[in-house]
Amino acid sequence: MSSPIDQLKERLYEVNALNAASALMDWDQQCYMPRGAAEARAEQGAVLSKMAHEIFVSDETQAILEKAGSEVDPASEEGALVRVVKRDMDQRTKLPVELVTELSRHGAIGHEVWVEARAESDYSKFQPILEKTVDLTRQVADCLGYTDHPYDPVTDQFEEGATKKYWEDMFDTIRQPLVDLVAEIKASPDQPDDSFLTGSFQEADQRAFSMRLLEAIGFDLTRGRLDTAPHPFCTNFSVNDVRLTTRFKDYLPSAIFGTLHEAGHGMYEQNSPQGWDRTPLAGGVSLGWHESQSRTWENLIGRSKAFWQFFYADLQKTFPGLANKDLETFYRAVNKSEPSLIRVEADEVTYNLHIMVRFEMETGMLDGSIPVKDVPAVWNQKYEEYLGITPPDDARGCLQDVHWSGGLLGYFPTYSMGNILSYQVWNAMAQDLGDLHEMMSAGNFQPILDWLVAKVYSQGNRHLPQDLIRQVCGTGLDATPYITAIREKYREIYRLN
């Protein structure tokens, strides 16, 4: 008879197969599914979610988990697996199957309503969806339990150990330095011109160049692919099946940096140990850690001058309209910083200000201090306060993100954590490998990927997120490297004193 740990893995494989089927249908919905199929797809997803939940929380699974836990070394890989599953079990057994089913159904229907509402820039169409999202999220918070704020158990699902106060403390360390830097940049008389990056760029050419970037940095296209979606994302159904999406617009950097961003997520998933595939040990340890890798490949690598010292000639060949723009002009253009409306296309300086708006909106909606009907007005007020601009319509305001349509509240602060953590990890890597910019300018990304695989990607979900930060960086989350590097980079770009 097989051991309890092997029996546990078999149960997890069953749950994983159902979750993978749900994820595959979600990927299809966002990339290819005809819109008329939304209702049927919602019901199909709800059935699969219900089945996966019932198998996972069943008395049989819980008995196997308890027996396996008594027989494994807590410090071993198997001990880590038991720890992760016990945490998940504790949370899942607190959620009624009816709530789990409804969350899945609501996410599928909500996505299609969001697509339509955003296309028409009509918040009134989306308001009922958001009201239900908030209601369901409050139910989740009540089931999981909390002491201080309903946001605490919700955000803990995405970043283990995080609370509303944790995020507030994090934002307090970066808010004023960023506001000050934004003011310095705005006052500079030497503003980069990025107008040449908007124009008629053929989608086929953008796709071909994006594919060459993926291959060059190490994303395995035999175990992954690139498609298009209204809102770029990465998903996976196995460490050997990782799907990226991007979008092609008349603003050339959108596809380039969107692809690099999602590739960071994708390479994290692809480089989990094969032996952990189909178990909760595979993949990123948290969303903050995941975002640190997407931002590393998008910003620290993709927006570096060294990166384009290697790739710019190829870009100019692909898009001859750039032939009369030198590297320095291009580098400054793709790093231009100015308050903007769209989060996913925000620069490194202003990006976290977008996240602060969303964090305050989410906590306010959950505790009732921001009525859902007032979301557009409050959103616009906060954009004026933080960024000095007011969205002219809902599509470029509160309807721009897909997250709330799928029921994802509590996710956004992990983006800022990822920005901060990416610079801590980068500094640790530089201490081990030496001149990273010299490697990139020569097109040699393998040592960078190998280091990240060894230190981060191969660790999967084995360690607690905060423990992995201390293990890789030698300290807890610290915004100092991020603020220092951002200030230095942008003072050079804007030729500030």
Image (cartoon, grey):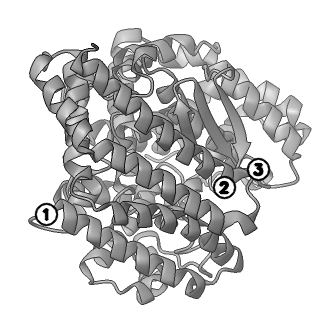
**Position of 380 relative to 396 (above/below):** below
Q: Are marks 3 and 2 in contact (CB under 8 Å)?
A: no
Residue hosting label 3: 248
Between circles 1 and 3, the one closer to the viewer is: 1
**Position of 370 relative to 236 (above/below):** below
Q: Tag 2's secondary structure?
A: helix
Using the numbered discs, state the Cα–Cα distance from disc 1 to disc 3 in whole angstroms: 43 Å
Which of the 4 image quarters holds residue 319?
top right
Location of residue 58 in the rendering, given as x and y in whole percent from the top left corner:
27, 45
Q: Tag 1's secondary structure?
A: loop
| Residue 190 circle label | none
Q: Are marks 1 and 3 in contact (CB under 8 Å)?
A: no
Location of residue 432 in the rendering, given as x and y in whole percent from the top left corner:
35, 11
Question: Going by the picture, which residue comes out furthest to the front?
Answer: 1
Q: Quadrant of the N terminus?
A: top left
**Position of 363 relative to 268 (above/below):** below
Q: Tag 3's secondary structure?
A: loop
Residue type pointed to by label 3: Phe
Residue hosting label 2: 29
Location of residue 164 in the rendering, given as x and y in whole percent from the top left corner:
21, 61
Location of residue 217 in the rendering, given as x and y in whole percent from the top left corner:
62, 21
Residue type pointed to by label 1: Tyr
Give the residue drawn at x 26%, y 40%.
480
Residue hosting label 1: 146
Using the numbered discs, state the Cα–Cα distance from disc 2 to disc 1 in whole angstroms: 34 Å
